[in-house]
Image (cartoon, coloured by chain):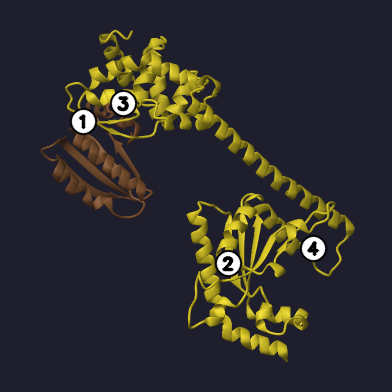
Chain colours: A brown, B yellow
Amino acid sequence: MQVSISSQDSKTLVTLDGRLDTSNVDQFQKDIAPLMQGDNPNIEIDCQRMTYTSSQGLRMFLMLQKSVMARHGKMVMVGMIPQVKEVFDITGFSNIITII
Amino acid sequence: MHCEMILDEYRESLPVFERILYVILDNIRKRLNDNHVVVAGLEGRVKTEKSLAGKLELKGYKYHTLSDITDIVGVRIITFFSDEVDIISALVEKLFVIDWENSVDKRKMLEIDRFGYMSLHYVCRIPESLYSDPAMPQLNDLRFELQMRSALQHVWANMQHDTGYKSDVEIPVEHQRSLNRLAGILELADEQFSRIRKEINDYRRNVQSLVASGNFDEVPLNGDTFRSYCDLNPFKRLADKIATINQAEIYDDSLMPYYKVLLHMGMKTIGDIERMRQEYSDSAYQLALIQLAGTGLDIVAYSVTLQNLCIVCMLKQGFGEAGLIRMFEGIYGPSDYNNQRAQRIFEQAKRINLI
């Protein structure tokens, strides 16, 4: 899983590339650690190239979402392929996380 | 001459008054917070030298020393509803020493055929048990004024002030009459707001007790009743069963996004949801089983229970793929993916003979 983080206008853009599973979830947690700080964060996660997420990946997204909401910010996931969306659907995570 | 002495005393005591104001506001805020009381406003001020000089010029004969003047420090608590003034006064009485002789309940002073300024004024002191400072021994002796009134009483008081209604300059009778009529309307509105709020609270309590007692058919479905029903954790058994598929953790999320879906599905009472739960829980589990088995996904949101129940209910009632698409649009907003989502679920439902 390749993670790149950049600033674009007033938001932080996180681009994900590849599979998010047990083999790389620890590194992913380190990668997104800087996003857990600051007021009113506005985070967009570009998932066009994310091919899969395990439940540990779901936990990471949930953790980030909770952190963002606690700081009165906004997090959206965009461009998700149907196979990954299905994971969010069948676990009910589509009801928790904003997916565009 | 004695007015000059009072002003000198004022200048010397200014830091004490400022400390008094800080202690009052800080303690009132804490007490309101501890008791979960929300107020429309909390404000305070130390009288300016100019204002004090003006007061002394007009009524200086009434005061011998600075401590005779009780409103050098003034604090006002503005409530949303008139009946909350009594709640606030009870909290205040526990905080400060009240000088009852000089305190006034202006709400009880008006004649039955008069309308106008209604506010509760307390003259108080800070007890040593609340706060003391050896460097400022007079802090616990100096009195301050505390006004408590509702937001509408506050509006009236400000209008009186701005229009000069109480000034010595006489205003024409027709304007006086208009202002009196307005005061009557504000008093009536204040009373009606309190009454309506009480009725809403009574209704909520009644509905909560109906929900808690299981009389679901008597409870109309609305945002409040749905929330009370959700508090009973009605889908826990289904959630636990779904969790066993992958020995999953259940993440306790809100079911409120489904409230509008339930309305769109034509549900009128909490009883309708309860019947859906009883009739379709097995099928909702079967749907989760075909979706989750073998995926290794060991976390599920609690809302997946109601999500699957609504899907099953829609399909059982013959709404088909089109019904599912409408439902998904209601939850997630319009998108092309809703068609794929509905198609996939429709196929899964056929495989487990739901349709």
Circle number at residue B165: 4
Q: Position of residue B75 (x, y in %)?
A: 61, 66
Q: Which residue is mark 3?
A: B239
Q: Position of residue B263 (x, y in %)?
A: 49, 23
**Mark 2 or 3, closer to the camera:** 2
Q: Name the amino acid type tagged 3.
A: Ala
Circle number at residue B298: 1
Q: Are marks 2 and 1 in contact (CB under 8 Å)?
A: no
Mark 3 and mark 4: Cα distance apart in space:
66 Å
Q: Is residue A94 left or right of residue B84?
A: left
Q: Is residue B296 above or below residue B99?
A: above
Q: Nearer the viewer, residue B260 or B59?
A: B59
Q: Which residue is mark 2?
A: B96
For residue B100, which quarter of the picture? bottom right
Name the quadrant of the N terminus of chain B.
bottom right
Q: Nearer the viewer, residue A74 or B258?
A: B258
Q: How dense is the environment of label 1, judged by Cα within 10 Å: few (below 14), some, or many (20 and up)?
A: many
Query: In the rendered structure, which disc, 2 or 3, sits on the residue that comes first in sequence?
Result: 2
Q: How dense is the environment of label 2, judged by Cα within 10 Å: few (below 14), some, or many (20 and up)?
A: many
Q: Is residue B304 left or right of residue B2?
A: left
Q: Name the amino acid type tagged 1.
A: Asp
**Mark 3 or 4, closer to the camera:** 3
Query: In the rendered structure, which disc, 4 or 2, sits on the residue that comes first in sequence?
Result: 2
For residue B278, which quarter of the picture? top left
